[in-house]
Image (cartoon, helix red, strand yellow):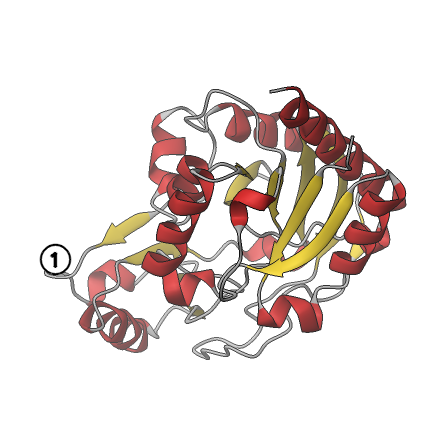
Amino acid sequence: MSAARIAVVTSGAGFEYDVDLPLIVAALRAEGLAAEAVAWDADSVAWDGFDLAVIRSTWDYATRLDEFLAWADTTSRHTRLLNPAPMVRWSSDKRYLLELARRGVPVVPTRVLEPGDQYGEADFDREEGVVVKPTVSAGARDTARYEPGQAAQAVRHARMLLDQGHAVLIQPYLSLVEEGERALVFVRGAFSHALRKGPLLTEPGVIDNFRVPHPDLAPHRPTHAELRTASAALEAVPAPHAALFARVDLALDENREPVVMELELIEPNLFLDTNPLGLKRLVEAVAAEAGLRACV
């Protein structure tokens, strides 16, 4: 019997910058699987020739969302795609935070402005300051925070995005994020490892699409409250099975309670280069999925 073929799905930027990518491919090959890195938009890829396609570093999806979602739908008809296309579609737009909140998950308070909605400076004038971002974004693209007194600048930011046809999130700036955002990684619904990241929006009023996306990484031991909140977010995902991989980004609110900032189910950095056990868990899960496919 030939080895199961695994596509580890990436992008042009992923080939260049994803330090986890060669580690995953090598570890899968060490498990006896025929693994290779493949760009999602590469020409003439026969996706039906793979037993499994695992999305990893498709880091340009947010700027090509319709194309990427069409690719996910098409590819899932030819092979098993993980995470699955419906989960990818659901998590591609940060409006999911509103759904998580409706399901009782603690999330950063979030308001969505749609193109055509009425708004004014009062909507951006908060005592703690605000964060403005598009609902579809990766790596904090087109995101900035504004201090009290900068409501006019925040309005201009929102108007720019709305005029481009993007929906906009307005959120309070959680000052305790300066103590570190928590990134909890899960494999098949089970907690694997966590890291703490330094603050990202360090300069008020500045949109910086070239900032380092994960500054000052350090290992983190999550509290029971953090694990509980992250697990609740994953349980609220409208899917019949747990995600193969997930990263739940948390911050502390003014009461020092964890709230969900983002639920990453498409192409999150899992920081496997910092955690060999996390790499082992992911590879074992992929190998198990490949075995299931081979038995079909």
Q: Give percent across and percent down for residue 50.
A: 61, 43
User: Compared to 295, does 115 lie above or below?
Assistant: below
Q: Nearer the viewer, residue 260 or 55?
A: 55
Residue 10 in the image, given as x and y percentages of width and height = 60, 59
Left or right relative to 191: residue 158: left
Instruction: Name the residue type under label 1.
Output: Asp
Quadrant of the snapshot with the N terminus: top right
Tag count: 1
Regarding residue 245, the answer to whether it shows in the image is: yes
The image position of residue 20, as x and y in percent, is 76, 57
> Could you tell me which residue is drawn at 51 percent across and 53 percent down?
174
| Circle 1 SS class | loop
- Residue at position x 37%, y 58% in the image: 136
Say which quarter of the image contains residue 129: bottom left
Residue name at image x 57 percent, y 32 percent: 243
Quadrant where the C terminus sits is top right
Identify the image quadrant of residue 277.
Answer: top right
- Residue 249 in sight from this viewpoint: no
Give the residue drawn at x 42%, y 38%.
77
The residue closer to the viewer here, 50 or 106, is 50
Image coordinates of residue 275 in percent, x first then y, are 85, 47
Q: Which is more toward the observer, 125 or 156?
A: 156
Which of these two is toward me, 81 or 261? 81
Residue that mark 1 sits on = 117
Mark 1 surroundings: few (<14), some (14-19) or many (≥20) residues within 10 A: few
Q: Is 87 rendered above or below residue 102?
A: below
